[in-house]
Image (cartoon, grey):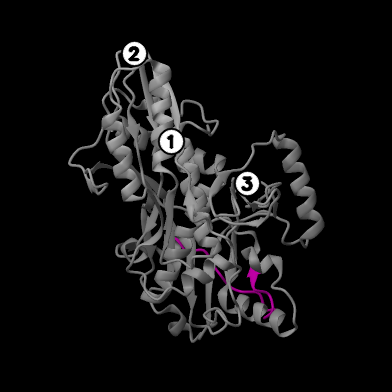
Amino acid sequence: MSLTSRHAFPVVLLLSAVAFGQNQPGNQGQNQFPGGITISPDGVIGARQAQRINPALQQRRMRELAAARLSSDLATVSPLRKISLVRLEAACRTALDAGQEIPIECRCLAGVTQLQYLFASPESGDVVLAGPAEPFAPLPDGRVVGVETGRPVLTLDDLLVMLRLRTYRQQLGCSFDPDPTRLANAQAWNRANSSPATINVAQQRFFQTAKILGAWNVTVFRLPADSHAAITAVEADYQLKRLALGLEHPGIRGFRSYLDLAGRNENTMRRWWFAPRYEVIERSEDGNAFHLQGPRLQLLSQEELVDIQGNRSDAAFTEISAERYTKQFNRHLDALCQRVPSFAAVQNLFDLAVTAALLQAEQLPQRVGWMPDLFYDDQQLPLKEFQVPAEVPSLVNVKQLNRSLLIGLVGGGVTIVPEQVISRTNRLSPESTPPVTPPADAAAWWWD
């Protein structure tokens, strides 16, 4: 979709997408989420007001908070912390039977910030997860992260979502999609208002296009619609959208928004989404140990065409600027996950989805004689409920390039089909497999 002018050649760029987030009560009639989004009373997502923060001071306060609230052994950095799922379930059962809340250390999986290993131990009747861990505390916005790296911790709720999936063969995630009727109306309005115009008039036309498009629908698929996993996905998708438009900058030297990279005459609709990317999943010969490695996450893109009825279809080409932006994004992925916690949270969701798929495909609970009941029971152990936004507004940003104006109206994405990720494995050698001997204390559900 484009408007032409002797002074301006604006281009409308569109996307649809998928993502993940979390929530807590907010102010002024909005729900404030642990992270960078708000949700209005009518269910529309928005950006949280930026605050100036001294990183060193914030980290010191978080360390003090972690030291005050966590036990001394939990308030330590561990290169590889092990979590017994069998004992964790028992610890949750003990708390519920006593009429108590699930302890925060259980909710935050002992401060593990990334999954690296999955073990089954038929001898001890245990299933063990392992990964790096650190002391944890909430950021000012409420998100619980490791105080050393700032990575979000894995959560029990997200683990339960993945364990309770009925199938791992279908796509999980969410999407932002424009209403087809409003999309067709925006196309028609553009065609009727394509006469030469001044830059100011052309810019006004862009904002009118966004007004006609209105809010985009948020759809969550095959995740509980009010779960922490769902809102995590939506948040990441929204942050992806704002980065592409240049409405936020991650503070990474050399990183450019898609709007910065876009050139003349690029007027297709564009879809970007997060997808899993694991270098390899290693499997021991006996099938009792698995190693996950790789970036976990990658950005993919696809050009789309829109007909006069507002129907979208994949284009047979890719704009050069879209390829450049996608490659740049993936090249800076590690730094982006450090600067944008919601992206790291999606990495964690992918790890948990892959782990749950391995548990089922390899029948690890049956192999060790563990019949989880509480973890599968949403009545006894319900998930925390979150208000997931129903709509995202059409965001607009314009730039002037010589005598050209460019506009971006963008969505984002996150999708995963867990079974596809675990379909190929390499051999995990015994010498590369760390020991996982549990402590003698049967109540100890994690150890270093």
Query: Considering only order in the chain, which callout, 2 or 1, is on the residue closer to the N terminus?
Result: 2
Quarter of the image with the N terminus in it: top left
Location of mark 2 (residue): 7
Question: Looking at the rendered structure, which numbered label has been put on residue 244?
Answer: 1
Vertical order, 284 against 54 (above or below): below
Q: Is 154 left or right of 410, judged from the image as shown?
A: right
Q: Which residues are magenta?
A: 432-448
C-alpha distance separating marks 1 and 2:
25 Å
Q: Is 238 left or right of 10, judged from the image as shown?
A: right
Q: Of residues 86 and 49, which is closer to you in this image? A: 49
Helix, strand or loop at disc 2?
loop
Q: Count the numbered circles shown.
A: 3
Which residue corresponds to the image point at 22% horizontal and 43% vertical from the top-left? 308
Q: Main secondary structure of the magenta part?
A: loop
Question: Looking at the rendered structure, which numbered label has been put on residue 150?
Answer: 3
Which residue corresponds to the image point at 59% horizontal and 45% vertical from the top-left? 36
Q: Quadrant of residue 86?
A: bottom right
Q: Quadrant of residue 14?
A: top left
For label 1, the crowd category at 10 Å Cα-Cα, with few meaning under 14, some 14 to 19 and many 20 or more, is many
Disc 3 or disc 2, which is closer to the eye? 2
What amino acid is labelled 1 in the image?
A: Ala
